[in-house]
Image: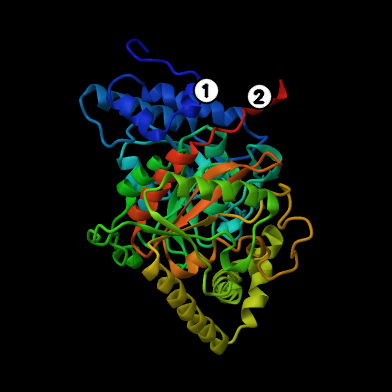
Amino acid sequence: MSGYVELDAEEYRAASGLELGRRVAAGELSPVHLAELALGLAAEAEPALNAYAVLHPERARAVAAEREAEVRAGRVRSPLHGVPIAVKDNMLEAGLPAGKGSRTSPETPATESSPMVGRLVDAGTVVIGRTTTPELGWKGTGISPRTGVTRNPWDPTRNSGGSSAGSGTTVGSGAVPIATGTDAGGSVRIPAAFCGAVGLKPTLGAIPVWPGTVNENLSHAGPITRDVRDARAVLDLTRGPDARDPQSYWSRPPGPGGGRRLRVGLVRAPFGIAPEAQVGRVVDPALDALVAAGGAEYREVELPAALPRAVFEALWVTGRGLGFRDLAREHAADMDPGLVRLGPLAEAYSLADYYEALTARRAFNAALAGVLDEWDLLVMPTMPLTAFAADAEVPEGGEADAPLPWITWTPYTYPFNITGQPAVTLPCGFATDGLPVGLQVVGPWAHDDRVLDLAVHAQDVLGPAPAAPRLRESRS
């Protein structure tokens, strides 16, 4: 590797994707060396964390060598050229099968890539592997029949969150600076918050989603990253219409604003639900630090709408239950029992029930839009609790028998899938149990850049979160 700087693992784990990409473009860092670091760190944490459905070392090395040759020839595809990334195993990647956390998934290689994956590959990133997800992305934990239990890098006895489980875990562990995710009820933000990473759910359709899902009016694609600026870079590289996702034509960025001072609402108990005390003791000082740093008008705000649990249940249960009903009838014994149970629950909904839920959704969306007519952004905790037991679906004492157990402990994430608004979580400190706590910024439809501007400012005020201790080091 003559002429290149060799990073040690800790230097690599502390660097943002943009920093790595800048140094690759300058000829300082070798994409092959970065791929080897990423592969080594990922393999070192397996199977203890179980972040990967599969690693592709030879494929990654070959692509990294191509990216290195391109730099030598004067071609740099993007600010993330040569940077290692991971792909959630529910997204298509040309030439590879998608396991989707399910034993029912065929081993047939995809013939084309999902838009987010294809655009990141075209931007010169190097995919090292595919990250775990619960079966067909149906819930907020990292447990699947196909890959087992994915664990939290800060404490492997705890939950990774989901459904972008392995993506949150591998970024939180420091193996890669960027991983792809999908979020239909919190599935980017939950694992990012639990694992100490940044997770961006852009406006619905900003990053096209394909293949479509059975809950397409809730489903967003977005990145999990080490740094807020990396999330912005991924959004810039992957946003924009794609005819395979008609919703991607609705979310074009608005024109420039009026230039007045930003007005930010601080929401300490979203929807009237206070976080656990140990979470509040981290979030409250983070909010106070933002206020002290200035740069905007901050004021305490209460959300005017009730938690829309019944609305989300109606949309999710009917979408997943009916969408996968035939699959569950044929393969129930091989599938997640919770997903299989949604079929009969879905059949109990009448068409009138469904339309009542749509009417209630419209009212909820109007109420939230009204808040964001008055306030440019909202800042709040991402999760009301820290990560619980790795093999549990709900925290101790939770509603295990609920139709959707996972939404009983995610009241701050799924409402913003109902509205389709952009939201980002970033680390803001650690609770007394030693686990990460996330701060969430929410903005109006299509104002993703405004959301990211405040998130960058918050990261600069609060400081970036470190990667989790390496398991090899913690055992020594």
Count of numbered badges drawn on the protein: 2
Q: Is residue 332 left or right of residue 42?
A: right
| Type of amino acid at the residue the image marks with label 1 | Glu
Colour mode?
rainbow
SS at circle 1: helix
Q: Residue 82: tell me if it is visible.
A: no
Q: Which residue is mark 1?
A: 10
At a point 43% along the width and 52% down the height, the residue shown is 222
Q: Is residue 67 left or right of residue 380?
A: left
At a point 57% along the width and 64% down the height, the residue shown is 270
Could you tell me which quadrant the C terminus lies in?
Answer: top right
Q: Residues within 10 Å of mark 1 (few under 14, many from 20)?
A: few
The nearer-to-camera label among 1 and 2 is 1
At a point 60% along the width and 66% down the height, the residue shown is 327
Give the number of the disc on residue 472: 2
Give x and y (percent) for residue 246. Answer: 33, 67
CA gap, disc 1 and disc 2: 13 Å
Q: Residues within 10 Å of mark 2 (few under 14, many from 20)?
A: few
Quarter of the image where one finds residue 373: bottom left
Q: Residue 315: tell me if it is visible.
A: yes
Give x and y (percent) for residue 211. Answer: 42, 60
Q: Is residue 119 left or right of residue 267?
A: left
SS at circle 2: helix
Q: Is residue 467 left or right of residue 157?
A: left
Task: Give the farthest residue toward the left.
Answer: 74
Give x and y (percent) for residue 335. Answer: 67, 59
| Type of amino acid at the residue the image marks with label 2 | Arg
Could you tell me which quadrant the N terminus lies in?
Answer: top left
* Residue sitting nearer the eye, 395 or 245: 395
Quarter of the image where one finds residue 321: bottom right
Task: Give the farthest residue toward the top.
Answer: 2
